[in-house]
Image (cartoon, rainbow, N blue to C red):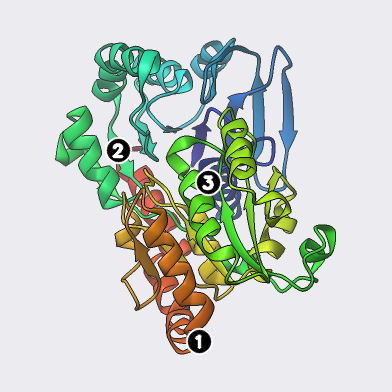
Amino acid sequence: MKITIVTHSIYPDSIGGREKYVYYLADVLGKRGHEVKVFTCSKGFASRVKKYKNFAVYYFPSLDIPLKEAVYRIPVLMLDKLLKDDADIFHVYDLHHFTSFVTALAAHVKKKPLIITECGYPPLEGLMHYLIKIYDKTLLKYIERRSNKFIAVSDFISNELNERYNVPRGKITRIYNAIDTGNFRIRNQQFKKRYNLSNKRIILGVGRLTKEKGFQHLIKAFKKISTKFPDTTLVIIGPNKSYKHLLDKLIKDLGLGKKVILTGAIDEELVKDAIRSCEMLVIPSEYEPLPLVAFEALSYGKPVIATSVGGMPEIFNHKINGLMAKPRSPDDLAEKIKILLTNKKLKAKITANSEKTLKKFDWRKTVSKIEEIYENFAE
């Protein structure tokens, strides 16, 4: 089958759960014998093609619209290429990107099936709130009408598609995010060496530095436990966004200094080594559909503390395979961190259930379910 996947951005050029997920999906679909192309935006007006062993990525020039929390790209020339494309099916990622709109147009003109995977979009404030409302009542409505099937990455997103965007339940299928755990091998401790953390217990956060990721709450929680546990260091890994300067100020105001490290974006293998080397992963999000980093931590048998928002309760049961914390509550986060630093018996119980949890989010089943949707709609 000829499959064209369209995404606003892709790994390794951009770091994020969706970006990595698209990359891994394209690769495994190619391994299974499909002819896979990925269309995406380049930074600026550069066009190029990058060929991997099992798929190819086509980068299109874009007009960049820098906003407070993100850069939105209007793809130039992508529509023309989509109209000439010989794909049996179009698969686009996320509703709130102009790449989704141009793909819907092409699918409509060519009478080709359109599949949309929705990974979630946090509610925004200020000007962005009103701009998104306009988008939702215009372009999003068109995309929804022209789509054949929506794939939601969690039950939370299924409900959000229906209740927030009025997508009919019959057009929605939940297929959990997942990762190929075979990619997670034992590595040398290069991360600890690079950041001089050989004698430290690492409390780790991974994600974009945005308000909804909740790292401000994690930093405040760490302040509450750092004196009692002087051998701990808080490390937050992720691309620097506009929210970073507020986190820097918070770290300074709390007097944490070198006790908190914001690494920025780093190499993927180094991220894996950081996860392997940490005491725990903390996901303090205010909004979280279903993060791949949770599965990455479980792959290394690392305990996870997650706020009870979005799709997190679909992964974790409190004190069974993780600890659940109240959202926006540094006090509760601090309490949960203390538990994992002191209660070895509970920590061992939680990590012992990692493999069982991962079986629920099996990568091979996820890919097979997506293939089944393709087959149902492709001619």
Where residue 300 sits in the image (x, y, percent)? 59, 73
Check residue 17 in the rendering and tell me which mark sits there, or answer none: 3
Please tell me whether mark 2 sits on a helix, a strand or a loop: strand
Task: Please name the residue that numbered disc 2 is placed on.
Answer: 150
Question: The residue under label 3 is which amino acid type?
Answer: Gly
How many residues crowd mark 1 within 10 Å: few (<14), some (14–19), many (20+)?
few
Where residue 90 sits in the image (x, y, percent)? 44, 31
Please tell me whether mark 3 sits on a helix, a strand or a loop: helix
Task: Please name the residue that numbered disc 1 is placed on.
Answer: 344
Q: Are marks 1 and 3 in contact (CB under 8 Å)?
A: no
Question: The residue under label 2 is which amino acid type?
Answer: Phe
How many residues crowd mark 3 within 10 Å: few (<14), some (14–19), many (20+)?
some
The quadrant the C terminus occupies is top left
Rounded to the nearest angstrom, the CA distance separating label 2 from label 1 is 43 Å
Residue lying at the far bottom in this picture: please name it: 345
Residue at 61%, 36% (x, y): give it: 249
Q: Nearer the viewer, residue 31 or 282?
A: 282
